[in-house]
Image (tube, rainbow, N blue to C red):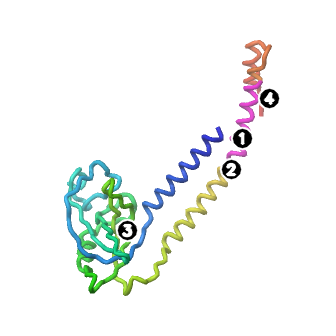
Amino acid sequence: MRYIKWTFTVLLVLFLAALLHYTLPQKDIVRVVDSDIKRMEVGARPVFWGRGDTFNETSGLGTRDVRFINTVDVDGRTRVYRNEDTGIFGWPPYFKTDSSDLQTLAADLRSTSADPRWVVLTHYGWRSTWFTIFPNAVGVREVESPDVQIIPWFNIVFLTLFALLMLAGYRLYQRFYDRWIDPAVDVLDEAWEDATRPNVPFGERVKSVFRRDRK
């Protein structure tokens, strides 16, 4: 039983960590080199794609046009972001409905290696070449140099509040367990021991399980 409990706890922690890492905003300092639109098959992995254009009736189709922002980071590595709306009720709750405006702004910030213009691109999600999934861009702004220091204030505040909430929930669970669950388990263990005693008639075993003096 102890192994099952620890296994469940570890899996739950890993799931929450993965969910937070995927959902919380991340910021990359990059240089925009291109922006384009590609026809993509999104039906097989809908959880890693957005809604297309908000209020677009064709956004739920398995194949649709997806905007992309192609960039290069300070170390020369390519980074590709999709640019899709999350909608008002979509997940994650970024309430993003301005993909067209963001695409235009990214196109206006394009630059070359000879005359670079560095931007901070805010996004969420993961990049995987195996599964053909891309992080979703949610904002872009120009900065003076790639050495600018970025402090993720939102993530710091959110994770702090989340940790406090989880701690409060754990304390409430402990109190509930100590007051209700633990005594009930003790009663069941005692009843089981009484019911499985050797050399006791079956009727007496049944009566012992439902004894009224158990507390």
Reading the image, the residue beneath label 2 is 174
**N-terminal label among 3 and 2:** 3
The reply to whether dot 1 and dot 2 touch (C-beta < 8 Å) is no
Crowd rating for badge 2 (residues with CA inside 10 Å; few <14, some 14–19, many 20+): few
Secondary element type, mark 3:
strand
Reading the image, the residue beneath label 3 is 123
| Image quadrant assignment for residue 8 | top right
Task: Please name the predominant secondary structure of the magenta segment in the image.
Answer: helix
Q: Is residue 57 visible?
A: no
Reading the image, the residue beneath label 1 is 182
Q: Which residues fall within the magenta stretch?
A: 176-193
Which is more toward the observer, 171 or 37?
A: 37
Reading the image, the residue beneath label 4 is 213
**N-terminal label among 1 and 2:** 2
Secondary element type, mark 4:
loop
Q: Is residue 19 visible?
A: yes
Residue 86 location (% of width, % of height): 33, 61
Q: Is residue 102 left or right of residue 121?
A: left
Q: CA distance from mark 3 to mark 1?
A: 45 Å
